[in-house]
Amino acid sequence: MGEPPTIDHRNDAELFAAINRGDHSAFETLYGRYRDWVAAMAMRFTGSHADALDVLQEVFLHLARKAPHLRLDGKVTTYLYPVTRSVAVSLIRRRRPLGDTISLEDLDLCHPPPEQVGAAGDLAVVLAKLPPAQREALVMRYVDGHSNDEIAAMLKIPEGTVKSRLHHALAALRDDPAARRYFGVQPD
Amino acid sequence: MSIDRKQPERMTDADLPPALRDDLRRLYASANPLPVPPEIDEAILFGGRQRLGDSRRNRRWSWVGIAAAACFTIFAVQHLIQPPKPTQIVQNHVESVDSNSQKTTLSGRREDIDGSGRVDILDAFTLAKRIDVGTATADSFDFTGDHRVTREDVDVVAMAAVRLKGGA
């Protein structure tokens, strides 16, 4: 994607409103701003480059399809996260064998990137043992830097549930011999 | 060995050791950025342009449809189903009652002053109008039995209309 000839100074809410009016340049600007973020989330969810690109396309086409009924109540990432997640889940489900009725909670989203070595590799192994929902909350909180209420809005769950998932994730990490060193505890 | 497990409400960023946070970020940051081929960009922007164009066209046609429906409704109301104005109804009935036997009504009720076949508030209005213009005769419209036609007779007709819940 080439750089736009002029910088679009409209904020995200103005871009949403303009997209609702059918303004394609607003769509283009929004795509430029959030393409990499959506692509990274899609890669995180699917773990596959090709699938992530499929998700990227579907998310932005979903956005265009929603016009003129788009509503932005908070950050664009708060709007895009559940859309990206939902599209990725649909794609993962389509790829699964017929009759495989795995629940949304158990879908392995946010799996650690493969082929890591050293400390990151050890951590990837530890994280892989966490329930997917706890791992997702952990990554959103400490990698993406979202607040608890933002996570709650993105996942459409109560904030208390977010806190609980983080609490259990951290407790599990403290209990894991491979991760105890992070907490200043010597392995048994 | 004791492990301190704080309640979820008390958790803060300090609960995550810096080394763990750094490794976590390093681990997931390694997946960034995902290279997006230019043809994918083009496909998405083309698709967006198409869909936004479609929605704008659909919106335009939906307004045309709404405008056409509104025009039809106005036409229908004005030319097909426009009811006569209430004042015309009253006037017509006052004249018709004057020219015919005042006791002959479709409903067979004396309170049906205007002969519409039902007793409603228009009968009370018609009687009031007749009293005003002095064409109410005592025998026909004396509902109170006092041998006079007054405001009280109008009230009797009005009460009859209300009791009959909008007409008989």
Image (cartoon, grey):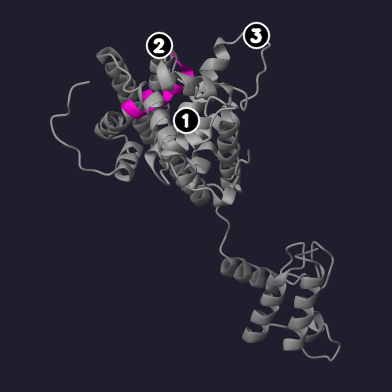
* Residue closest to the eye, B67 or B35: B35
Residue A45 % position (x, y)? 48, 22
Whole-angstrom CA distance, mark 3 to mark 2, is 22 Å
Whole-angstrom CA distance, mark 2 to mark 1, is 18 Å
Find disc 2 in the rendering and name its residue. A50
Q: Label 2 crowding class (10 Å Cα cut-off): few <14, some 14-19, many 20+?
A: few
Residue A125, relative to residue B160: is it above or below?
above
State which quadrant residue A146 falls in.
top left
User: Which comes sooner in the sequence, label 3 or label 1?
Assistant: 1
User: Which comes sooner in the sequence, label 2 or label 1?
Assistant: 2
Q: Is mark 1 on a helix, strand or loop?
A: helix
The reply to whether residue B111 is in sight is no
Residue B74 % position (x, y)? 47, 48
- Tag 2 near tag 1, CB within 8 Å: no
* Residue closest to the eye, A142 or A32: A142
* Number of the front mark, 3 or 2: 2
Q: What element carries label 2?
A: helix
Q: What residue span does the magenta drawing correspond to?
A: A36-48
